């Protein structure tokens, strides 16, 4: 157990803490718990790469912790009436599609596209939308829908990158170099 994996494990612990705080109606502390989880996500990745402590356990658990926290937040906002069923369904559909597609192609021996700036930007924009919803900002739901649309655009870009990454190498005709 290294420090990055310990930070990832902390995110799993923060999920039930978030649920308890949110259910008690403490929106700002619940939001701060979500932010703390986001900070540990940034830190664990940075520390793992910087110190050469990247492990297979971390590679597997890190995105799982992220998705579980985000799913928990989305479900809590849905159940409490802070977001619509349609918004929650669109977010779940996009994430499930990305996960299922990644797993399908991974197990078929295809190269997968690593997370890039567009994926990271999408995550930051989702957290910003969630923050606006927590603080009941004007136009928070319109912003959320804009982020959802952007996330689908990002997914389409990932599909094009995946196709380019897995494009068969054209063979040169015999005798030509």
Image: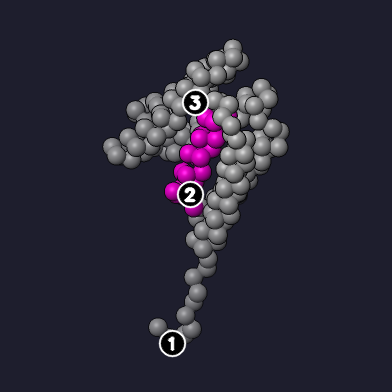
Tag in front: 1 or 2: 2
Residue corresponding to mark 3: 34
Helix, strand or loop at label 2? It is helix
Q: Is residue 74 left or right of residue 45?
A: right
Q: Is residue 1 left or right of residue 139?
A: left
Picture disc at residue 175: 1
Question: Which stretch appears magenta?
Answer: 113-133
Q: Quadrant of the N terminus?
A: top left
Q: Is residue 102 above or below residue 28?
A: below
Q: Residue 36: image x %, image y %? A: 43, 25
Q: Is residue 77 left or right of residue 124?
A: right
Picture disc at residue 144: none
Farthest-out residue, top: 24
> Sequence-wise, which precedes: disc 2 or disc 3?
3
Residue corresponding to mark 2: 118
Mark 1 touching mark 2, by CB under 8 A?
no
Q: Residue 147: image x %, image y %? A: 57, 43
Mark 1 closeness class: few <14, some 14–19, many ≥20 residues within 10 Å: few
Q: Residue 136: image x %, image y %? A: 58, 26
Place residue 160 in its image quadrant: bottom right
The residue at the point 66 percent across, 37 percent down is 87
The residue at the point 48 percent across, 49 percent down is 118
Q: Quadrant of the C terminus?
A: bottom left
Q: Is residue 76 above or below residue 142?
A: above
As measured in the structure, the alpha-carbon distance from the residue carrying label 3 to the one carrying label 1 is 61 Å
> Sequence-wise, which precedes: disc 1 or disc 2?
2
Mark 2 closeness class: few <14, some 14–19, many ≥20 residues within 10 Å: some
Q: Is residue 54 left or right of residue 34?
A: left
């Amino acid at each position: 157990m290294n420090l990055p994996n310990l930070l990832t494990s902390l995110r799993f612990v923060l999920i039930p803490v978030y649920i308890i705080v949110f259910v008690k109606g403490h929106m700002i502390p619940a939001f701060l718990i979500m932010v703390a989880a986001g900070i540990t996500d940034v830190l664990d990745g940075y520390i793992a790469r910087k110190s050469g402590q990247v492990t297979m356990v971390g590679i597997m658990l890190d995105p799982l912790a992220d998705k579980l926290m985000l799913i928990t937040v989305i479900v809590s906002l849905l159940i409490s009436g802070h977001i619509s069923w349609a918004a929650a369904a669109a977010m779940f559909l996009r994430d499930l599609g990305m996960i299922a597609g990644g797993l399908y192609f991974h197990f078929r021996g295809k190269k997968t596209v690593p997370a890039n700036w567009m994926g990271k930007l999408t995550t930051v924009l989702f957290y910003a939308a969630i923050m606006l919803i927590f603080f009941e900002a004007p136009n928070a739901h319109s912003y959320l829908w804009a982020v959802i649309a952007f996330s689908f655009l990002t997914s389409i870009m990932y599909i094009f990158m995946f196709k380019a990454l897995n494009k068969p190498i054209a063979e040169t005709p015999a005798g030509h170099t």
